[in-house]
Amino acid sequence: MSNVLLIIGREFNERVRKKSFIVTTLLMPVLMLGLMAAPALIMQFSRGDQKRIAVVDESGLVASRLQNGDELVFEPTDLAPDEARRELTDRFGVLCIGSDILTNPNSVRLYANSSSSLTVESNITGQIEQILEAEKLKGYNIENLSQILDEVKTTVVMQTYRNDKSQEEDSQAQSSVVATALGYVLGFMLYMFLLIYGSMVMQSVIEEKNSRV
């Protein structure tokens, strides 16, 4: 038992009490939190160029009520979806809204001419959801508003396609959520590699400095 205690004490003195161990133990959690939070903060506060989106609204309910902002400008068009996709390639994309949008909130498609983002898609679907909910409220008695709001709550699912890659719709839908998640995973792996490598370099430098002393 005494030998075990001696070994534990020696290992503690040789490893745990080293300055390099203390420094890396304190710094690594802080660096890890900072590196994980950085992409989210950059995505939240950074703004891209203004994006013009052509809107083909077969329902006639949504296009005129979409609100322009600093990042997105909606431009209703009378062109058919296929024509708009072919001719309006100077726009960021073409937003197509089906005629049955009230009963089928999934009939919304964005044909992007460049890579879309989660922020852009959330902006679009959020506005459409509010418009549809307001439209559905017109058919109810406002006396039971809380119940009505629960019944008309609508979630829009939009499929995003790269218009510059293919005109074929089969299996071409893309998800910015998946792309964003994949980016986070790859970024996290890169940060972990850099973090471990940096801690190893720092430890070797401190040990070399201590050996000289």
Image (spheres, rainbow, N blue to C red):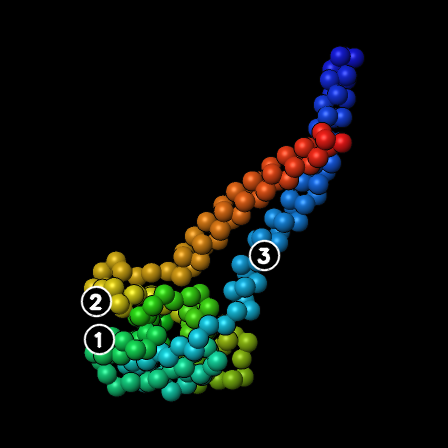
Labels 1 & 2 near each other (Cβ < 8 A): yes
Residue 128 in view, yes or no = no
Q: Position of residue 4 (x, y in %)?
A: 74, 15
Residue beneath disc 2 = 167
Q: Quadrant of the N terminus?
A: top right
Q: Residue at x 32, y 74 (%)?
A: 93
SS assignment at label 1:
helix
Q: Residues within 10 Å of mark 2 (few under 14, many from 20)?
A: some
- Residue at the far front: name it: 212
Which labelled disc corresponds to residue 37? 3
Q: Is residue 100 left or right of residue 37?
A: left
Q: Quadrant of residue 198?
A: top right
SS assignment at label 3:
helix
SS assignment at label 2:
loop
Q: Amino acid at mark 2?
A: Gln
Q: Residue at x 25, y 64 (%)?
A: 165
Q: Amino acid at mark 3?
A: Ala
Which labelled disc corresponds to residue 86? 1
Q: Position of residue 151 (x, y in %)?
A: 46, 73
Q: Earlier in the sequence, mark 1 or mark 2?
A: 1
